[in-house]
Image: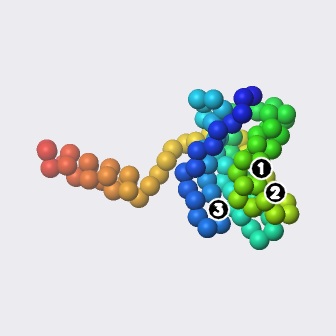
Amino acid sequence: MEAARFERTLRTESSEIFIVYGGARRIGRVDIHYGRFEVHATLLLDTELTDDELQQLIDQLDEELVQTHDPEREDFLVTVYKAEELGFYSDEFESDDDDDDDEDEEDR
């Protein structure tokens, strides 16, 4: 597997979310939470990776994202899931859909 690329989608004082790409292909998402002594990550994979590829990805996450944010952390804990995105939901998108429905009713 070629080196992953990370695209940040959210950052707060104590957490970050990144989309993970392998080349041009999305391979997953990682949520990173910075605690006082430990850094916790939840890695959601869209694709199958070998054990070696997974370890390479975790090492890259640690080197490029975690250590640059908190080089003094005591442990980096990663939980990995194989996931399938079923959709994206938002109050804003739902209200847009409702507005479209209202316009359709007005056109009748």
Side of 76 where 98 appears, left or right:
left
Mark 3 residue type = Ser
- What element does badge 2 sit on? strand
Give the percent coordinates (x, y) of residue 26.
Answer: 60, 35
- What element does badge 1 sit on? helix
Residue indicated by mark 3: 15
Task: Pick the quarter of the image with the N terminus.
Answer: top right
CA separation in Å, label 3 and label 2: 14 Å
Q: Earlier in the sequence, mark 2 or mark 1?
A: 1
- The residue lying toward the viewer, choosing from 51 and 11, is 11
Q: Are marks 2 and 1 in contact (CB under 8 Å)?
A: yes
Q: Earlier in the sequence, mark 3 or mark 2?
A: 3
Q: Which mark is residue 76?
A: 2
Residue at position x 76%, y 33% in the image:
49
CA separation in Å, label 1 and label 3: 14 Å
Residue indicated by mark 1: 62
Mark 1 residue type = Asp
